[in-house]
Image: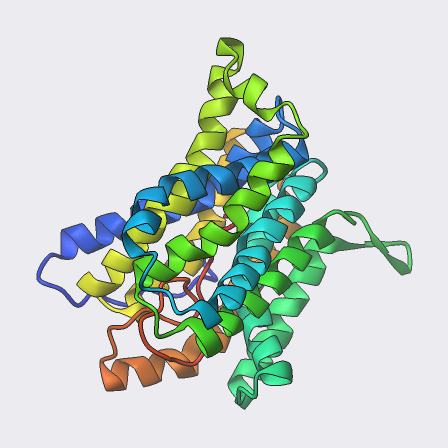
Amino acid sequence: MSQTTPLPSARTDAPLLTWGLLLLLALVWGSSFILIKKSLQVYSVAEVAAGRVFLAFFFFIPVLLRTYKEVPRPLLRYLFLSGLLGYLLPAFLFAEAARHVSSAMAGTLNALSPMFTMLIGALFFGQRSRGMQVAGLLIALAGALMLILTRTGTSLSVTNPYALCAVAATIFYGTNINIISRYLSRLPALVSTAWIFAGIGPLAFGILLFTGFFGKMSNPDNLLPSSFLMSLGILASGLMSILFNRLIQLSSAVFAASVTYLMPIVALSWGILDHESIGVQQWLGTGVILVGVYLINRKRKTTIIKSQNTQVPATSPFITKPTKPTAHAQDQGE
């Protein structure tokens, strides 16, 4: 991955801890796509998508019980919308994509989230975009097209139409990031994350009642795929959300956002280990996307460094004060 950019230095007295947390986040979130693929060997698309959301909701129940008085009632609608666009719908889209495209492809396309964050912010949320960001958007889009399109003779044809499901999920991610930045940024980090799942958790549970999810979970023969699914919900969406917030407290938003560049590498590595077909075009497309993401983030990162802002970036679900949207690889497809 020679096209990826050097990671910013950690600003902390515990560099080993911060680097360890960063690598752990990249490993877990980058592994989400192979976990989806393996879970689908037993569970349906609806069971994987709704199941991981329900399990994350279950993980946050203790937080919900302790913080139910801390959430202003007018914000509940935005919390529900954030959960719908940032978690539930992308979970279905990535699960559907995983049935038809490689986990490496899905993991790479997930890196488009910063591109749509910038685009949707500019179109609908009044965010200003600079020339470098626009250039990054076009470059990232070109990289995505390299993954989705191939040349046959003299014409372009869509070879992976289900890859568009993953792209659609990143559009929802970009919309959600702007919603969080505009409406939810003053909530404490852990509170906002928990209450995002409070709205969609019961909905996911209702969906699961019409499936064979609970019977499969209780079947000892399904221990391995059930473990994969539990890892998606409890580990990736639950525990890693908390650790990401802790990483920002220990280092900086810039350093933590480096996970954006590491996740596709992890996803591609799992694809290779699982004997997925990964050609030169996919490696090249991945590199082009990451270059575009770097350019989209470049101006914002400089601003953060100058102000030494250690708050959570607006691209994360763990926001404690208003900031402009930047790039972060949301789990959620993670």
Up the image or down, 108 lies above or below 50; here it is: below
7 horizontally vs 109: left or right: left
| Residue depicted at 43% across the width and 71% down the height | 184
Q: How is the image coloured?
A: rainbow
Up the image or down, 132 lies above or below 57; here it is: below
**Residue 287 quadrant:** bottom right
Q: Specify the farthest residue to the left.
A: 13
Q: Quick check: can you spot residue 224?
A: yes
Up the image or down, 240 lies above or below 124; here it is: above
Position in image of residue 282 (x %, y %) = 63, 50
Position in image of residue 277 (x %, y %) = 64, 36
Q: Specify the farthest residue to the right.
A: 154
Total count of labels: 0
Camera-nearest residue between 148 and 127: 127
Position in image of residue 77 (x %, y %) = 54, 66
**Residue 110 quadrant:** bottom right
Position in image of residue 292 (x %, y %) = 54, 71
**Residue 210 quadrant:** top right
| Residue depicted at 52% across the width and 85% down the height | 132
Camera-nearest residue between 164 and 120: 120
| Residue depicted at 55% across the width and 89% down the height | 131
Camera-nearest residue between 258 and 187: 187
Q: Quick check: can you spot residue 112?
A: no
| Residue depicted at 56% across the width and 28% down the height | 38
